[in-house]
Image: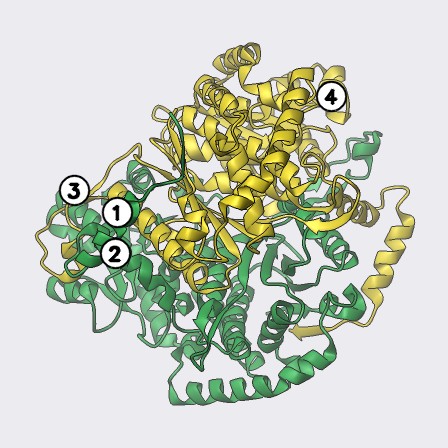
Chain colours: A yellow, B green
Amino acid sequence: MSLTFDYTSTFEDIVGKGNGIKHSMLDKLNDIFQSTRADLLERNAKGDLPFWDLPFNNELISDIEEYASNKKNRFKNFVLFGIGGSALGPTALHGALNHLQHNLLPNDKRSGCCYFCPDNVDPDLISSVFDVIDPNETLFNVITKSGGTSETVGQFLVILDLLKHSIGENWRDHLVVTTDPHKGFMREFCTIEGVKSFDIDPGVGGRFTVLTPVGLLPAKMTGIDIRSLCKGAGEMKEYCFRETFVNNPAAMLAAIFYLAQTKLYRPIHVVFAYSNRLYPIGDWFRQLWAESLGKRYSINGKEVFTGPTPVKAIGATDQHSQVQLYIEGPADKIFLILGSKTFKSEITIPDLELKHDTVAYLQDTELSTLLNYERFATAYALTKAGRPNMTIEMDEINPVNIGALLYLLEAATLYAGGFYNVNPLDQPGVEAGKQATYALMGKPGYGKLRQEMNDFKGIGRNLIEIP
Amino acid sequence: MSLTFDYTSTFEDIVGKGNGIKHSMLDKLNDIFQSTRADLLERNAKGDLPFWDLPFNNELISDIEEYASNKKNRFKNFVLFGIGGSALGPTALHGALNHLQHNLLPNDKRSGCCYFCPDNVDPDLISSVFDVIDPNETLFNVITKSGGTSETVGQFLVILDLLKHSIGENWRDHLVVTTDPHKGFMREFCTIEGVKSFDIDPGVGGRFTVLTPVGLLPAKMTGIDIRSLCKGAGEMKEYCFRETFVNNPAAMLAAIFYLAQTKLYRPIHVVFAYSNRLYPIGDWFRQLWAESLGKRYSINGKEVFTGPTPVKAIGATDQHSQVQLYIEGPADKIFLILGSKTFKSEITIPDLELKHDTVAYLQDTELSTLLNYERFATAYALTKAGRPNMTIEMDEINPVNIGALLYLLEAATLYAGGFYNVNPLDQPGVEAGKQATYALMGKPGYGKLRQEMNDFKGIGRNLIEIP
């Protein structure tokens, strides 16, 4: 493992008064850090927060390895049906650690099954996947922690019907379910039908499940070394429990983000990945950060409407899209830059002995050098413009470092819950939309809401119609 | 064409005091609307803003159709090297109008060439494309408006070398360049070497080029009906110049976004696409909105540090990731929901006669119905939570409607420039980062900056190292 967290450019002596934090602000947070850490340690000891010890579940890793060794060569395709925390973790791992054109590689060059994760109920998306897979060559993984997520269960009914029609008798061989060990519709289904399943520990929130079978099974089936992934995550644990605040990377990351929002008015937290492999981690982080910290009520029940807005960006690409705003727009952002010293591949811009000013300086340069120079240059330009920024740099993008990074960000989320004084493990705000959907779908018990929604549709509307 | 823009839920009588705009706020903007419109009309008449008439360039459309008819069957792959405005438009068109697994379809099922747009200098990305294409079957399109974008020129040198080595004599047949008609390195190269090229009108800013050869050539080569695309855009023109403010969809969209930021403190503008096809339009819009409006100086030269932060989201997926924050977090967002009444494909959740509460209501429902119910439900929940939102709904996702939508958003950007009182056509803020890159690359004339950057690297740093 080798990661460096550099937060130099978040201090006001570097980015300017009002733009950066002061050491005294960190000092004032030390008590909350200590009490949060003590609380997390205590809950960890009680087994109350099983998330902390997911990397050490060697039995599970072996189970998944064994399952995958039987299935990986039998199936060309692995299709994951899940949404939110049941999709973003596996997709982040796939993006970071598999080939960037994984599904287009020939079978003998691919590290494992083709990976599809159509995490929506858009019929164009679902049917596009059906157009390019043969069910006979496909393993479907249905992932829902509760066992009743409507999008996922809807997808499940579609593929159950498809499998029974296209495979017949042996349809069970093409299905594996990842869900609660005891409760919910999918668990009942697996028990009754004898379908293979993996458990999600009920104590692990959906957005913290990347190191459960939710993330590990798809990873292993597509060719990722999950033992190294868990090793990196596991090694990170002690750093995330370090007692000295300024040496604890999870707590410091959380504290700086928190101070940026509350003391510097920087509510927009940009994760700026200088790597196409690291970019999908931004989507995973978006859920982690937004759902955990975006809360109406504090722990004490006070109405606070708090939480940062996570935004993902990619370099160098977004230098040609977002950096104008980042440098010259409102001073409402803080940046977490993700980078890697080295890349798996190397391409050198050849020296064609062109003399033109536009190209001369580019010749005989490695693309990785150009990309990392652009990363340093953007960080420097942000700093000079008074825009606080910090960087996590790894030595290479490999399973150990990715495991460590994801674990670090999860731990940071728990510390951030302490600083923001909210419960980072619930998501009460998504209920209203779910109920409104139930009402429209005609689910029993939602008649009144349905009427209200119909009334709302019927009011005089402000419309511009373009026929 | 059939689009409806519904902005009912942006008014304070619907979303609550302080959460919505007032009619009087719109009334007060009428003068700016009228003067902006007059200015845009005048510049359009003078030929000063060629963007407005791009959809009517039938000669160009025919040229591209002819070129593509010769090349489309000859090449399996179309690889675009460009970044920012030279990539986001073509990629948005590809995402919206081609099959969602386009590159995985067999040749006889695909509407045109496979599409690759590796818009970064990440060596893992570039080499991943090289791993799955055969240069003999590939047409490379190098797109840079200035002719000197460092990332694109770097990529160009790599493929020039590759083509000369792998194809030999006939390397020119595999290359087409889209650039300025007269100036820049790529133009000089095409002239000297006799390489096929298309022009980008110098009067059209990079982020407004989707209806120039930048967007049209890749679209045609991959199988999109560019004549319908331009037809839809062209039909939108008159709506965008409508004289009555409340009937002008471009001006109203811009005005509501502007008022949300300046009067309601909603600086975060979320484009929430309820369709995987419409989602990549969010990336294209991000550039359009951020680079055009994120400005340090107003038109009058006053320091303002203004501009909204565009964020893209996708439904129903992000209901399981961002909606918690959108409903319960700070009241700092306004939402533009994009949706479609119908989809190209249809999938029905089968009725398997399951009685379980979790699934009973889902059975015998079309996925498109579920998705659109979720869209209405989310809009309703946002409204009830006092979060202003508006919706653009099309009858179907087809080239006419997509052309109309993109044109509408571009026109809205020009009106927004008027309301924000900034120049929507420049991007001065990206210079600092470019210069810092030049300094690191050792480009002549940047020695002092290089020294400054080295000094900055050498200061005492705040680091946490995780070895």
Residue at the disc numbered 2:
B150
Q: Is residue A78 left or right of residue A320?
A: right
Disc 1 residue type? Leu
Disc 1 from disc 3: Cα separation:
25 Å
Residue at the disc numbered 4:
A187
Query: In terms of sequence position, does the residue under pointer 1 or pointer 4 come before the other?
Result: 4
Which x, y percent locates residue A52? 59, 22
SS for callout 4 = helix
Looking at the image, which residue is at 55% across and 30% down?
A: A79
- Marked residue chain, label 3: B
Looking at the image, which residue is at 81% across and 31% down?
A: B353
User: Quarter-wise, where is residue A381 in the image?
Assistant: bottom left
Q: Give a yes or no on whether discs 4 and 3 share a subunit.
A: no
Looking at the image, which residue is at 67% across and 80% down?
A: B26
Disc 2 from disc 4: Cα separation:
54 Å
SS for callout 3 = helix
Residue at the disc numbered 1:
A370
Nearest-to-viewer mark from 1 and 4: 1
Q: How many numbered marks, from 0 up?
A: 4
Disc 2 residue type? Ser
Which x, y percent locates residue A9? 41, 48
